[in-house]
Amino acid sequence: MPSPSLLDDLVEQQHGVVSHAQAVGAGLGRGWIGHQLRSARWRRVFPGVYVTHTGPVTFRSRVWAGLLHAGTPAVASHRTAAYLQGLVDDEPELVEVCVFAPHRTTRQDGLRIRRRRRFASIASAAGSIPVTTVEDTVLDLTELVGRPDAVVGWLTRACQRRLTTPARLGAAAARRSRLRHRQLVREVLDDVRAGVASALERRYVRDVERAHGLPPSERNSRQVVRGVNRYADVRYRRWRTRVELEGLAYHPADGSHRDHGRDNAATLHGDATLRYGWPAVAGASCSTALEVAAVLRRRGWTGRLRPCSSTCLVRAAQPA
């Protein structure tokens, strides 16, 4: 009787998953494989793909099953790759893989197979699992969303988590002949190079600060207060004013104590601190600009706001 030990190394690398072709190629007979399945020692995940133990099927095992079902070459992509690479924290329900455009596969529950024409040059590895590069993972995800803020979120999160850099993302974007949101991607990467670290921060810089003529701020600047590094989302250094932006995706509730410590330290250092969330930045940018300007003027700014539109509140609030 053949021994499954011939497959031990491969099974370990593939998180307990093996294809029928791999098992036969290692010398295991079809009858022996059928016996493993009938006795429930092995279980069928997809046609011709088996998990070789009776325990829970892990996410990485599901990914390997998807790759083996899709055929060689295939790589994990999109949210699956994002999870494996640390770009997202929650394990996706759906396994997503990419294959060459001509590939033919059968549809399976829990598995989405995407096709692309350029492929070999973008494959890398996360552990033992072949995945798209971080840069291509990020760009793939931006192409699936319609809202500009969601595009910004993927780009800034990847850089904020130090998984890639604006330069590498820009190079990956340039290699693509087609890229949805190309101009927006370019603009966001320019902003990230300048220190913008979140979608909400970009909205503030664009819709509150630049649109209304507020002075240019520093983003994510570091201060050392009593020997502790403190970072401000937005800081007007000359006028000792800080703006902290409370986007839920970037400032979770369990980090509130750190926010309070940062704000208290800023006050001790002599800075005024303003705090805004999405409603103030995205829904009331004109009144937010007026409020920031009022604080800056009390601290010596002599500039003048400009209206962002014919209906801007700044038009009515400032003397002609």
Image (cartoon, rainbow, N blue to C red):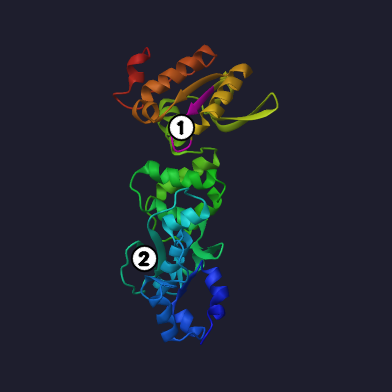
Q: Amino acid at mark 2?
A: Ile
Residue drawn at 43 percent across, 35 percent down: 248
Please tell me the numbered disc located at residue 205.
Answer: 1
What is the quadrant of residue 305 in the picture? top left
Q: Nearer the viewer, residue 167 or 112?
A: 112
CA gap between label 1 and label 2 equals 39 Å
Q: Position of residue 14 (x, y in %)?
A: 51, 69
Residue drawn at 46 percent across, 53 percent down: 138
- Does residue 47 appear anywhere in the picture? yes
Identify the secondary structure beneath mark 2: strand
Identify the image quadrant of the C terminus: top left
Identify the secondary structure beneath mark 1: helix
In the rendered view, tell whether residue 98 sits above or below residue 272.
below
Residue drawn at 36 percent across, 19 percent down: 314
Q: Is residue 63 magenta?
A: no
The 10 Å Cα crowd at callout 1, few under 14, some 14 to 19, many 20 or more, is many
Q: Position of residue 286 (x, y in %)?
A: 37, 23
In the rendered view, tell whether residue 152 sits above or below residue 57.
above
Please tell me the numbered disc located at residue 113.
Answer: 2
- Does residue 304 appear anywhere in the picture? no
Q: Is residue 248 magenta?
A: yes
Q: Position of residue 173 (x, y in %)?
A: 46, 55
Residue at the limit of the structure toward the front, as seen here = 39
Q: Which residues are magenta?
A: 242-250
In the rendered view, tell whether residue 255 sits above or below residue 111.
above
The 10 Å Cα crowd at callout 2, few under 14, some 14 to 19, many 20 or more, is many
Q: How many marks can you see?
A: 2
